[in-house]
Image (cartoon, rainbow, N blue to C red):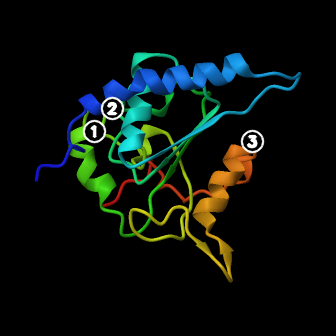
Amino acid sequence: MLKDAPYEHYAYDGAPALNQFLDGLETSRSGESEPHRTVIGHSYGTTVVGAAAQTGRLNADDVIFAGIPGVKVSRANELDVPEGHVWNEEADGDVVPDIGRWGHGGNGFVIPSDPEFGANETTTDTHGHSGYWDKDSQAGPSQSLLNQALVIVGKGGEVPLKPRPDPWVHVK
């Protein structure tokens, strides 16, 4: 049976509903303090988030991607959130990012785990495509889950990031 995930039209079909939902949150907000909205996309949901940013205004302060096949854009600054507020989690053993880039990556098949995309690449301690929300009853929440919580509450500066290779160092 042919799976639907390779087709981008589903993401573009769902994008207006995501934008309307986020706009509705803004409209229904009450109180004096400014809200902090974080959009989390997992797997094909990340493609929907990218399509929503391309086709409208993504009314969010932060975006977290996990297990991402691609977001249809090539740079974090194309996602309609403040600079430095795009976060990416890619767990060991998650093959979706490498496979998905060919169908949903930006120009040149760029995805958020690529350094040139410009996302904050967070540390992860989970494995596979569906472990980003794992919680061990003895050890507590995974680092992946804790990182998401820090971003959600507006403490992204406390999220541990994976070291990136220096783009100015040339390997011989």
Residue 159 sits above or below residue 32 on the image: below
* Earlier-in-chain disc, 2 versus 3: 2
User: Image quadrant of residue 108?
Assistant: top left
* Earlier-in-chain disc, 1 versus 2: 2
Residue 85 sits above or below residue 144 on the image: above
The secondary structure type at the circle numbered 1 is helix
What x and y, as percent, mark residue 54?
40, 21
Asked whether disc 2 touches disc 3, contact meaning CB atoms under 8 Å apart, the reply is no
Q: Residues within 10 Å of mark 1 (few under 14, many from 20)?
A: many
Which residue type does callout 2 highlight?
Answer: Ala
User: Image quadrant of residue 106?
Assistant: top left
Can residue 130 be seen here?
yes
Query: Mark 1 and mark 2: span between their CA atoms?
Result: 10 Å
Numbered mark located on residue 104 in the image: 1
Q: Residue at x 75, y 45 (%)?
A: 153
Q: Residue at x 46, y 16 (%)?
A: 56
The secondary structure type at the circle numbered 2 is helix
On the rendered structure, is 172 left or right of 1? right
Which residue type does callout 1 highlight?
Answer: His
Query: Mark 3 and mark 1: span between their CA atoms?
Result: 29 Å
On the rendered structure, is 3 left or right of 95? left
Which residue type does callout 3 highlight?
Answer: Gly
Residue hosting label 2: 11
Tell me the quarter of the image containing the C terminus.
bottom left
Residue hosting label 3: 154
Mark 1 or 2, which is nearer the eye?
2
Can residue 58 be seen here?
no
The secondary structure type at the circle numbered 3 is loop
What x and y, as percent, mark residue 75?
42, 32
Q: Residue at x 76, y 29 (%)?
A: 35
Query: Mark 2 and mark 3: span between their CA atoms?
Result: 27 Å
Asked whether disc 1 touches disc 2, contact meaning CB atoms under 8 Å apart, the reply is yes
